[in-house]
Every structure is written in structure tokens, then in C-alpha cells.
Amino acid sequence: MRDYENSTEPELIRWAKQGDVDAFSRLYAGIYKDLYRFALYTVRHRQDAEDAVSEAVAAAWENIGQLRKEESFRAWIFTILNNCCRKILRRQRKDVGSLTDSIQQGSAQGNGSGVQELAGSVRKHADGARGYADQDYAEKLDVREAFGALEEEERMILAFSVFGGYRSEEIGAIMEKNAATVRSRKSRALEKMRRMLT
């Protein structure tokens, strides 16, 4: 009988590659919060973040046999999650485009006043919500938006650093980049976010 509680990550990965669902569940339990935070900061909506994590975990389970290096598990699953998030972001942009088209068609058909009422209602609701929202929430929302505006590689580096707790050398090994390059890109990404937030 396998001791999942006291097993190392490489052992759990080996067992998961052999089809052991309990070993994979243990791996997932150890990384779920980091995956969810990464997804939430990237796609900005809780439901979409949960969908992205679920899709990434399902894909990881189906393809765990293809994982070559056990020490690359976290980078591998974050890469899968990043791809899932990108798919959701494309869908979000498409949905926004469809909504914009619908509003423009409504305006062309003489429904402009209805659109203006809707916009006024949304503004009123947002203003009311601002009165109840605490500063901390607003700051977190701004940070998520700034994070989402970064380039993919910059998001990955910051995700590994902030959510995964990896050092530049470890991130470099995971992403097959020089540690100095990782530090430079991390610094550039943080500076971009600082400019967006000020």
C-alpha cells in the first residue's frame, strides 16, 4: 500500500504516470491554490478561473504520461493552465465583440435610448458598489488587470515567482532560460505593472 501522505513529489508523479489517481490527486491538492490564483489573475473572473483550472487539471491527468522530467511537473501544468487561460481570454474578447456589435445594431435600429439607460444603470450600480467595496478589493482588481496585460512569458515568470515561490535559478531551469534573463524579465514585468498601477 502506498503512503501518499509522506511521499515526495517525484514519487507521486511516477505513480500518477502509472495511472494512480490518488497520487495525481495528492499532486493537485498541493498546487491547487497556486493554479487558481494564477488563473484568477489572468482571466479576472472567478467562474472562468475555475473553468481554466478544471480544464488544465483534466488535460494534465490525460497527458501525464507525456511528462518527460519529473522536476518539470509544476512548469508543465502551469503551461497547460496558461494555454487554457489564453483560450478563455480569446473567448472573452469574442463575446465582448459580439456584445459591441449587438449594441451598435440596436443603436442603428433606434434603440439608442435603451442602450443609454442600460449604460446609466451599470454606472449607477458600479458607483453604489464602490461605496461598499473596500480599498483592498479595488487594489486587487487593478493588480489582476495589470497582471493580465503582461506578455505571456512575463506572466509565467511572475506566476512562478509569486505563486510558486521559485527563485530565478529555478524558474530559469524550468523555462530553459538563463537566471539573469529571468531576473531581467521579472524586473521589467514588475516595472510595467508599477507603471500601469500609478
Image (spheres, helix red, strand yellow):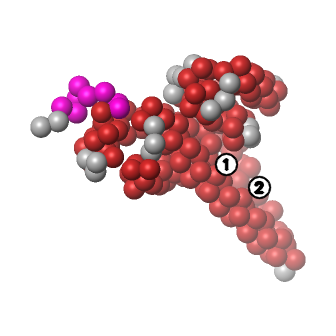
* Figure quadrant of the C terminus: top right
Label 1: which secondary element: helix
Residue name at image x 73 percent, y 24 percent: 181
Q: Amino acid at mark 1?
A: His
**Earlier-in-chain disc, 1 versus 2:** 2
Query: Which residue is disc 1 drawn over?
Result: 125
Placement of 186 over or under 110, stated as above or below: above
Q: Nearer the viewer, residue 130 or 96?
A: 96
Residue 4 lies, in percent from the top left, at 22, 33
Residue 33 visible from this viewpoint: no
Separation (CA) of disc 1 from disc 2? 9 Å
Q: Residue extending furthest left?
A: 1
What's the magenta region?
Answer: 3-10
Residue at mark 2: 120
| Side of 143 where 174 appears, left or right | left
Give the vertical position of 15 relative to 176 (above or below). below
